[in-house]
Amino acid sequence: MLKEILFRFNPWWEGEFTTELIPRPLYSQQLLNSLSHKTIELITGLRRVGKTALMKLVIKELLSQCESNRIFYISLDAYGLESYSIHDIIEEVRKIHKHSRNTTLYLFLDEVIEKTSYQQELKNFYDNENVKVFASASKAGLLKDQRALLTGRTRLHEILPLKFDEFLRFKNITIKKSESYLIDQYFEEYMRIGGMPEYVLSGDIVYLHELCDNLLYKDIIAAYGVKDAPLIRDYFKLLMERAGKQASVTKMAKVLGISPDTSRRYFGYFQNSYIIHTIERCGKLNERIRSGKKVYAGDLGMRNMITGFRDKGAVFENLTFFEIKRFSPCYIYQNGIEIDFKTNHFLLEVKFNSEMTEKQKHLFEQIPSEKKIVIDTIDSFLKLSESFK
């Protein structure tokens, strides 16, 4: 049975591999550039954001560079694999193809945290096997290496929803220079739909509803043994309402009639599943601890489905956050005045077709920074996005 499962997941072992997947070179090229390095490539992000598709895109390119039987893909949550360790599975692959220990294998392990011993097994692969490992997971628990087994052996690739240029590619839209006036209309559609690949392709709102249900059930309710499913759904709605704003776990606890500790625990569950992202207030430790974190939706299509497509300023800020997330921003809050983002290299305020207040301008001017940026139009957003490629 195991052999049959392995062949089913690896059709290129028996013939041509064709795929109509739309390229995402922003990420696939990073992974292809890592082929000569021994590091374990950890691919994380929101469920259904495109991690599996990305693996298949890398496999397609890799097939032009080496023998097909040296490339192995498996989804470790597949039915029939429950009793097998990752090493059991790879041993079977070596037997099937008569690979010696010196043969380099390329392993693509989807949903790797389905195997409870994955950390030890990945360490053993890194230390003792001639393999290059790409491993994915939809929960940040992948990163919580309590015994530091994988320290120094991994590199993280967080996959975010589609950027605007990817959105246009998935929609098969090309905007001519002579028709640049169309950009604003398509960008507003992008703000409304969000960047989940399958939803962008289909536009089927039922798919998005089912995705939200799967996220809440599989990644929170089932994963953490939460018994009150309606409460989790209400918590999700509150978080989507707070996207682009500070969120207080204590206030949310009061609204829902639960303890602050329970609220804090739920908040962590949503973070771990990439359903939300957060940033802290800039400042000293006590200021960071006392202040609420700002919340950003993991995908704007899901946020808009819950809240309706309103408060475009918050949506615009959420998109800007995606562009600068890798710089680990924090937010400024002084005397009731807020500046959206600060990093080690720049200060950034987001205004959607509006202007800063005089108090904001004064604070913005007073804060020292290498570079100061105001994103107030779609054009300025697109220039920012292009500059960070």
Image (cartoon, grey):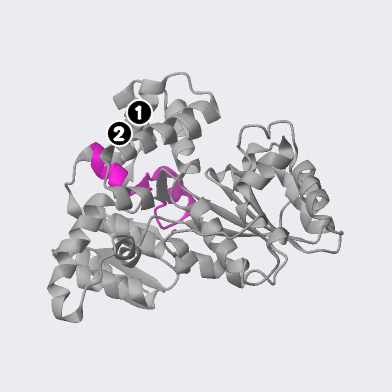
Q: Residue at x 34, y 69 (%)?
A: 347
| 293 in the magenta segment | yes
Q: Residue at x 81, y 47 (%)?
A: 91
For the residues labelled 2 and 1, say whether their Cβ atoms are less than 8 Å apart: yes
- The residue at the far bottom in this view is 178
- Return the mark for residue 373: none
| 107 in the magenta segment | no
Q: Residue at x 74, y 36 (%)?
A: 84
Q: Quadrant of residue 282?
A: bottom left
Q: Is residue 284 left or right of residue 16?
A: left
Residue 34: image x %, image y %? 63, 69
What's under tag 1, amino acid-wise? Arg
The front one of 74 and 356 is 74
Q: Secondary structure at mark 2?
A: helix
The front one of 284 and 385 is 385
Q: Which residue is denoted by mark 1 in the rendering?
A: 233
Residue 114: image x %, image y %? 63, 37
The N terminus lies in which quarter of the figure?
A: top right
Q: On screen, 235 above or below 85?
A: above
The front one of 135 and 292 is 135
Q: Is residue 184 left or right of residue 348?
A: left
Question: Range of the magenta residues?
Answer: 279-306
